[in-house]
């Protein structure tokens, strides 16, 4: 084994600065390090298990915002002397380019994208040295460096690891509010490896789990009294040079983020690892349909080339034609997945009866003597205090939105802009408020601006444990949106003082 004192970084130094502007996501970027570790594990699986019979690949990602560092560590086989130069020289294709790290760019581009400085400690299984090198973007660019110094020190031959430390993080680095999304995305991207039990990925102390969705087990819609069937179709399909293996199934329950296809290559999710899954219309139909909301699947593809950052397939037209051909497989008489998805309705009369009984039981349990009478009296007392009502309205009207969403519409020949403003205001009793504003610009454009302010800090949202994630608020936001539109439309239907309904609602919901 030859000694390594330096390693070429090949590219002209100013090229590295362009890496910072690549179009990428934090999840995909962190995934480059995971790809390298998983591939190292796969390449040396036999040796690793020979050394430790209960071995498990452990990849840990830790973000420290206080010190502006990211640590990525793994106990894979390390980077050996044969592959060390290739690991650091950009665009140097690995000796075996059939794995997850096929482009030879992952660690370098990811590290420059995330940080100004990074260093790598690695100890290859079977070698007796640990190697260390560090990269400083400013020095590389200003001093036009094309080589990095490598420091070797003795280490036991049976040790194996890689530790990468990123410091002086860039604006691309993950923010605290992104971590839950990153965990979700990485869990999805590496689902196949996580399910084997041989791979563990830990992000800021939390182990990731592969997504697992229930599959419909019910009779065929044409024979509702027939035997239950597990509505999962195994896929083993070829068309020319392209192959697909996996499954397509019907969700047991409609679940946000579960529907759609996840497309994989070499065990890794390429499309569908994040929030954007694949919905070819030839299979899924129109957005919002039962088929669209209940169909899901995982398909391993062969023959398709992936994009440089592994977030898509290059042959998009061929992929769509492939899905069109695959559609016939899903309409087979022995298991007509598409027909079942279009026509099966999960909740029959018996199920609705059970739900209604449960609702009634809950209402009876919470009921108290003369509760409604007291509530009405308290509300009457509050709304008679005009000063109190005006203060409530003023506070929420002047609250600055955390986020807003606007859309335009027409009603009775007039143009409107409806804005949903999300605010947090603890000094008001109002759960939501509707405000009409007429600015000079609106008058010029003959447009009315309507703002529906939703108070996320209202006690209503803490009273029920359902409200934990953004998607949990979707039903209540839809209700407020409908109430706002109703308040706008009501005066044209003969209703006077339509806002009274909102004022009374805000007071009653407090009780």
Image (spheres, helix red, strand yellow):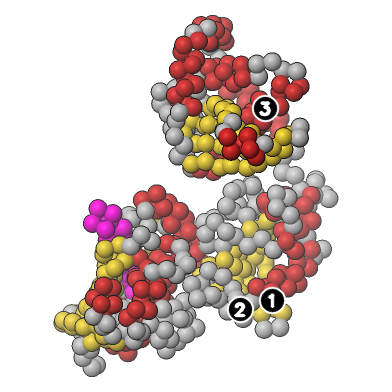
Our reading of the magenta stretch's main secondary structure is strand
Among all residues in the image, which is located at the extreme right? Answer: 222
Closer to the chain start, of discs 2 and 3, is: 2
Q: Nearer the viewer, residue 390 or 375?
A: 390
Q: Position of residue 115 (x, y in %)?
A: 31, 66
**Residue 206 sits inside the magenta stretch:** no
**Region of the chain picked out in magenta, as a range:** 58-76
Give the label on residue 318, or none.
Answer: 1
Relative horizontal placement of residue 14, taking residue 429 as reference (left or right): left
**Residue 67 sits inside the magenta stretch:** yes
Q: Position of residue 448 (x, y in %)?
A: 64, 33
Can you say whether 36 is above or below 387 in the image?
Answer: below
Q: What residue is at 61 percent from the left and 20 percent from the top? A: 499
How far is mark 1 from mark 2, CA to CA? 9 Å
Labelled pair 2, 3 in contact (Cβ < 8 Å): no
How far is mark 3 from mark 1, CA to CA? 49 Å
Labelled pair 1, 2 in contact (Cβ < 8 Å): yes
Q: Position of residue 39 (x, y in %)?
A: 42, 77
Give the label on residue 488, or none.
Answer: 3
Badge 3, how many Cα within 10 Å: few under 14, some, many 20+?
some
Badge 1, how many Cα within 10 Å: few under 14, some, many 20+?
few
Q: What residue is at 57 percent from the left and 33 percent from the top? A: 439
The residue indicated by pointer 2 is 304
Among all residues in the image, which is located at the extreme bottom? Answer: 2
Mark 3 against mark 1, which lies toward the viewer?
3
Q: Position of residue 469 (x, y in %)?
A: 48, 42
């Amino acid at each position: 084994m030859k000694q390594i004192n330096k390693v070429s970084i090949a590219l002209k130094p100013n090229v590295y600065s362009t890496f910072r502007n690549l179009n990428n996501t934090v999840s995909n970027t962190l995934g480059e390090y995971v790809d390298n570790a998983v591939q190292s594990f796969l390449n040396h699986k036999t040796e690793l298990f020979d050394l430790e019979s209960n071995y498990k690949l452990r990849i840990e990602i830790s973000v420290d915002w206080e010190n502006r560092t990211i640590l990525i560590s793994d106990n894979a086989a390390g980077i050996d002397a044969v592959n060390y130069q290739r690991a650091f020289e950009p665009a140097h294709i690995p000796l075996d380019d059939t794995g997850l790290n096929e482009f030879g760019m992952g660690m370098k581009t990811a590290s420059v994208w995330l940080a100004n400085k990074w260093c790598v400690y690695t100890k290859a299984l079977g070698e007796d040295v640990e190697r260390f090198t560090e990269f400083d973007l400013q020095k590389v660019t200003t001093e036009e460096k094309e080589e990095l110094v490598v420091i070797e020190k003795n280490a036991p031959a049976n040790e194996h690891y890689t530790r990468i430390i990123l410091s002086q993080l860039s604006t691309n680095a993950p923010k605290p509010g992104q971590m839950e999304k990153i965990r979700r995305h990485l869990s999805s991207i590496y689902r196949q490896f996580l399910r084997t039990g041989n791979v563990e990925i830990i992000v800021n102390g939390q182990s990731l789990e592969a997504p697992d969705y229930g599959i419909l087990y019910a009779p065929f819609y044409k024979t509702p009294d027939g035997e239950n069937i597990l509505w999962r179709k195994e896929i083993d399909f070829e068309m020319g040079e392209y192959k697909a293996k996996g499954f397509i199934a019907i969700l047991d329950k409609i679940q946000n983020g579960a529907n759609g296809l996840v497309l994989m290559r070499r065990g890794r999710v390429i499309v569908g690892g994040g929030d954007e899954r694949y919905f070819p219309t030839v299979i899924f139909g129109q957005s919002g349909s039962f088929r669209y909301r209940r169909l899901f699947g995982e398909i391993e593809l062969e023959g398709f080339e992936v994009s440089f950052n592994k977030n898509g397939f290059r042959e998009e037209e061929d992929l769509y034609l492939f899905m069109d051909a695959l559609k016939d497989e899903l309409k087979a008489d022995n298991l007509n997945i598409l027909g079942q998805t279009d026509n099966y309705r999960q909740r029959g009369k018996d199920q609705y009866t059970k739900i209604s009984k449960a609702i009634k039981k809950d209402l009876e349990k919470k009921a108290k003597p003369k509760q409604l009478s007291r509530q009405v009296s308290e509300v009457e007392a509050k709304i008679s205090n005009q000063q109190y009502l005006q203060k409530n309205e003023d506070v929420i009207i002047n609250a600055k939105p955390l986020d807003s969403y606007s859309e335009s519409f027409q009603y009775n020949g007039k143009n409107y802009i409806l804005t949903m403003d999300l605010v947090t205001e603890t000094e008001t009793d109002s759960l939501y408020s509707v405000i009409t504003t007429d600015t000079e610009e609106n008058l010029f454009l003959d447009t009315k601006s309507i703002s529906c302010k939703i108070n996320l800090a209202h006690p209503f949202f803490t009273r029920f444990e359902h409200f934990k994630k953004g998607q949990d608020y979707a039903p209540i936001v839809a209700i407020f949106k409908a109430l706002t539109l109703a308040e706008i439309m009501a005066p044209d239907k003969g209703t006077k003082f339509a806002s009274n309904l909102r004022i009374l609602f805000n007071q009653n919901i407090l009780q």
